[in-house]
Image (cartoon, rainbow, N blue to C red):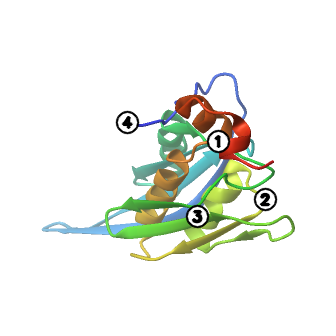
Amino acid sequence: MSTVKRVKTSEIELKDRLVSIRRVTKVTKGGRTFSFSAIVVVGNKEGIVGCGLGKAKEVNMAIQKGIEDAKKHLIQVPILKGTVPHTQEGKYSGALVLVKPASPGTGVIAGGAMRAVLESVGLKNVLAKSKGSPNPHSVVKATIDALSKMKDPYTVAQLRGVELSKVFNG
C-alpha cells in the first residue's frame, strides 16, 4: 500500500534546482546530432518536492521540460523538527540510498544529487548515504522513493490505533 500524497501545483510556489545536464550524441549517416537531457528537482522547502527529466535540442528547452515534468510528479514529505521522522532506505534501478534523521545543528550531510532533493524538501538536519549506482537520475529517484515512504508519528499512531506517546517520545 503506497502512502504517497500527490499535491496540486496551482496553490504553491516552487523553486527549481538543476541537478544534472548531459549532452547526448546520436550518430547517423548524415553526421552527428546533439541533444541535451536535464534532471531537475522542484520544491517549496516546506515538505513538497518532485523531480523530472527533460530532453531537447537546446539546454534551456531541456531544463524547461524538466521543470514541467517535475511539477507533474510532486509528493508531500513529513518534516519533524527540521529532519525526517525515521530512518528509511530507497531504491531505484541500481541506486540504493539511506536517509537518517540528525540532531539539530548537523546540517544536510549528503552528496550531489541527494543534497539537491533534500534541500528542496526543506530538511535542515539529515544524514544521507548513496550506496549503489552514482548515476544522478537513479540517485534522485531513489531519494524521492525513500522520502515518499516516510510517515509522521501522528499518522502511525492513528493507523495503529494507539496513543501518540507509544509511537513517539516528543
The residue shown at (56%, 74%) is: 129
Of the two numbered discs 3 and 1 on the same chain, state the one appearing first in sequence. Answer: 3
Judge depth for marks 2 and 4 and give the one in front.
4
Q: Are marks 4 and 1 in contact (CB under 8 Å)?
A: no
Q: Are marks 2 and 1 in contact (CB under 8 Å)?
A: no
Q: Secondary structure at mark 3?
A: strand
Q: Amino acid at mark 2?
A: Lys
The residue shown at (44%, 51%) is: 53
Q: Amino acid at mark 4?
A: Met
Q: Which residue is mark 2?
A: 124
Q: Indicate whether 46 appears above or below 8.
A: below
Q: Which residue is mark 4?
A: 1
In three-dimensional space, the C-alpha distance between marks 2 and 1, rounded to whole angstroms, equals: 17 Å
In three-dimensional space, the C-alpha distance between marks 4 and 1, rounded to whole angstroms, equals: 16 Å
The residue shown at (68%, 34%) is: 163
Q: Which residue is mark 1?
A: 152
In three-dimensional space, the C-alpha distance between marks 2 and 3, rounded to whole angstroms, equals: 13 Å
Q: Which mark is residue 99?
A: 3
Which residue is nearer to you in this view: 105 or 25? 105
Of the two numbered discs 2 and 3 on the same chain, state the one appearing first in sequence. Answer: 3
Q: Secondary structure at mark 2?
A: loop
In three-dimensional space, the C-alpha distance between marks 3 and 1, rounded to whole angstroms, equals: 15 Å
In three-dimensional space, the C-alpha distance between marks 2 and 4, rounded to whole angstroms, equals: 29 Å
Residue 38 visible somewhere in the drawing: no
Q: Indicate whether 86 appears above or below 164.
A: below
